[in-house]
Amino acid sequence: MIIATKQSLSVLLIEDNPGDRRLAEIALQEGSLEARLSCEVSSVGTLADARALLSGSLSPFDAILLDLGLPDTTGLNGLTSLGRACPDIPIIVLTGNSDLAAGTEALKQGAADYLDKADLLPRPLLRTIQYAIERKQHEVELLRLAQTDPLTGLLNRRTMLTRMSDAIASSRDSQTGCAICLFDIDHFKEINDVYGHRIGDNLLKQIASALSAELGSDYTLARLGGDEFAVVATELESAESVPKIASRVIAVIESISVDGDARVAASASVGGASDFTGDISTEELLAQADLAMYKAKVSRRGSFSLFDDAMNAEAQQANEMLRNMPSDIEDDRFFLEFQPILDAQTHEIVAVEGLARWRDRSGQMISPADFIPIAEKFDILPRLAAKLLDDACSLIRAWSDAGVPVVPVSLNISPVQCRDPLFGLLVLAALTKHQVRPHLLKVEITESTIMNNLDQTRANLELLRSRGVGVHIDDFGTGYSSLSLLRDLPFDTLKIDRSFICNLEQDADAGAIVEAIIAMAKRLGFHIIAEGVETESQMELLTKLGVDALQGFYFSKSVSSQRLAELLLEQQASQSPRKLATRSA
């Protein structure tokens, strides 16, 4: 029984022998009449004529019947050529003299089926064509599924990498340039956490649809996974085109919003890289764009960064730090220094903040601003934080045993630690291990860290506070927490960010903000620390405004654990409180 899924067929017959051509045409006409189908047959005698007909046809053919013995091609070359020109059309090879080997080889080269010319009977011929069409439709659908992202319908990562490789080769041949822009959605995890994955998925689909409409077929648009996308551009005249592409991407995404429980707006951080040599690998170009995107992300929301040689040097430095970090943690090359926190009235040291330091194998000090982001990105931070927590508790124990008048030590806590359900228990375990009283340890957490994972952060902080560990909100005024969080979360100390302190003397607005923060904090019962104090006038003004404690270079830079012990012993021995001289490690 013939399976008819279409009411009409359009077949291209490529046969140079007039007699064989006529037999095939008759078989198609009789078979279509029997199946009550409309069948239109276009016949040509050469491969060149076939290619011309295919390129000029307004409606593509459903199937191609191809004779392997054409005058302008040899063997299977015609099959290969047609397969590249029209990959979505099934090609059925016609062989002579029961040439089974030729037919089998044709199947290996992409033919949908093969028939002996002696067997061109109406029903078998039409059945072979229809089965070939169905198989090709399934093949095309499977290929589409393999090449595209199921959520957005965009190309997937594997297909995008292939297109990038082709773009690089094309730029080399055409002496033009190619580029890639990588971007992801700012704070997408928070969108999923707050509004749910349904809203997050809808946002990704809207972005894909809007960008497809904006960029059209001139660019290759792909979803690489999660909230990360890529745009590949070819035939560029200069690298100046890349920022323009990025600007279009950013503008489109910022114009999108999704209605859920609340209106969700989006923005993107875009990194671009281009090549005009054709000598770069796909992996290298992608890595360059990834570095540029990372720089854009740490710059500001909705920004663009284009790869340059300076980023390459930074990447090499980052890779070297990444290689050395695990072994240097084991070798105690990471350690704590301590910046004193002084009572605003007496200027006695009443607490210290522990600050992470790294002295590498060459003896060079590496800035926390350089190594902390790398430790966070590559999941080394939990290990480093655990080591520094243990060091802090060990030092408190050692100072106490040596008769040093110990003051509370505060440690900065990262978003990675706050997301860990075991974080609170790990802190308590370190205190127990070294027999340290909980009130001698404080944790400092920023506003942005609180919002990163509110529920888990709350659980960890409430556990610590219930056991006597102090909880500071750090860099207050720079994040986006609400006043209700200050009331509801278990804070006992508020630290005013240094950005307000540094402008205190020149900026009346900064002074008003600081005064308002102090008044609010006092109403809520918080202990107040002003950090970043660098001048005597700042110290005097903050004291007058009513802060409880002061921290900054005016009193002391960070000092070693040994020097801190000496300062605390000197303070104990002194009968008259004194202001510390500025000291560095």
Image (tube, grey):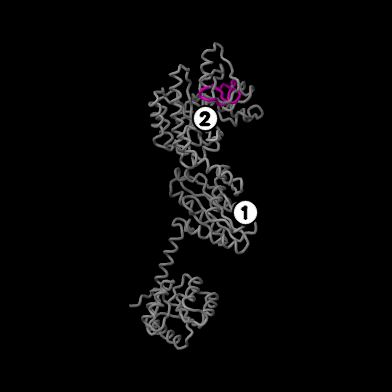
Q: Secondary structure at mark 2?
A: strand
Nearest the eye: 200 or 392: 392
Which residue extends farthest left? 1
Q: CA distance from mark 2 to mark 1?
A: 42 Å
Position of residue 443 relative to residue 311, above or below, is above
Which residue extends farthest bottom? 19
Q: Which mark is residue 358?
A: none
| Quarter of the figure with residue 470 | top left
Q: Which mark is residue 355?
A: 2
Q: Earlier in the sequence, mark 2 or mark 1?
A: 1
Q: Amino acid at mark 2?
A: Leu
Q: What is the chief secondary structure element of the magenta stretch?
A: loop
Position of residue 362 relative to residue 102, above or below, is above
Position of residue 44 relative to residue 583, above or below, is below
Would you name the residue on which mark 1 appears? 244
Query: Residue 488, how many percent across, how many down?
Result: 45, 31
Q: Is residue 388 magenta?
A: no
Task: Sort mark 2 into few (<14), some (14-19) or many (20+) by Cα contacts within 10 Å.
Answer: some
**Residue 123 in view, yes or no:** yes
Query: Residue 334, how many percent across, how many down?
Result: 49, 32
Which residue extends farthest top? 575
**Residue 40 in view, yes or no:** no
Query: Residue 85, how many percent across, how many down?
Result: 51, 72
Residue span colored magenta = 543-562
Task: Sort mark 1 into few (<14), some (14-19) or many (20+) by Cα contacts within 10 Å.
Answer: few
Q: Secondary structure at mark 1?
A: helix
